[in-house]
Amino acid sequence: MTVVDSCGWLDYLRDEPLADAFEPYLGATAVLVPAVVLYEAYKVMRRERTDDEADRVAAWLKAHVVIPLDDRLALEAADYSLRYRLSLADAVVYATAQAHHATLVTSDEHLRGLPGVEYVDEAAPRV
């Protein structure tokens, strides 16, 4: 199972340099989407693109398993936030991956080196 951080989805959607590196993870069958990732991707696409494109992105992410933020996950995220000095969103994404025994794939420097994190720092070759 895999959790792809917001940066991965957005790099891919905006065809940024790490898009090709994230692509194999986004097409996997067992991708979990923390609700905060759905929020961030939708918000950025609404701000930068059209409402229709933001709606398509939301539908694509919702086609995966969306993990809501419940009380248990909120408390675990708070603990991770304190332990690793993470922002709310980073802590929720990390806690979601940890709670589901999933690998977190990210290019976010704040999460680099944490247990269970696969850090993407190079662009895959473009074809």
Image (cartoon, rainbow, N blue to C red):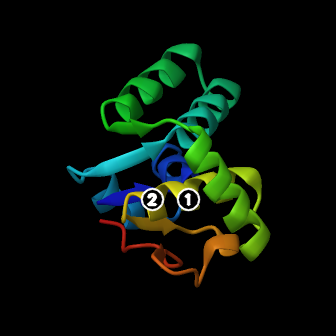
Q: Is residue 65 above or below residue 85?
A: above
- Residue at image point 37% right, 48% down: 32
In the picture of the structure, the residue carrying the numbered disc 1 is: 95
- Left or right of 37? Residue 19 is left
- Left or right of 116? Residue 76 is right
List the single residue furthest toward the top: 52
Q: Is residue 106 above or below residue 89?
A: below
- Residue at image point 53% right, 53% down: 11
Tell which of 81 and 42 is nearer to you: 81
Q: Please tell me whether mark 1 sits on a helix, a strand or a loop.
A: helix
- Residue at image point 68% right, 50% down: 89
Q: Is residue 26 above or below residue 47?
A: below
Q: Residues within 10 Å of mark 1 (few under 14, many from 20)?
A: many
Tell which of 21 and 126 is nearer to you: 21
List the single residue furthest toward the bottom: 113
- Place of residue 112 in the rendered image (x, y in percent of width and height, measured from the top left): 61, 79
In the picture of the structure, the residue carrying the numbered disc 2 is: 99
- Residue at image point 55% right, 43% down: 37
Amino acid type assigned to the residue bearing label 2 in the image: Ala
Image quarter of residue 7: bottom right
- Left or right of 36? Residue 4 is left
Image quarter of residue 66: top left
Q: How many marks?
A: 2
- Place of residue 95 in the rendered image (x, y in percent of width and height, measured from the top left): 55, 59
- Place of residue 100 in the rendered image (x, y in percent of width and height, measured from the top left): 38, 58
Quadrant location, the C terminus = bottom left
Mark 1 and mark 2 residues within 8 Å of each other at the beta carbon: yes
Quadrant location, the N terminus = bottom left
List the single residue furthest toward the left: 29
| Mark 1 to mark 2 CA distance (whole Å) | 6 Å
Q: Residues within 10 Å of mark 2 (few under 14, many from 20)?
A: few
Whether residue 63 can be seen here: yes
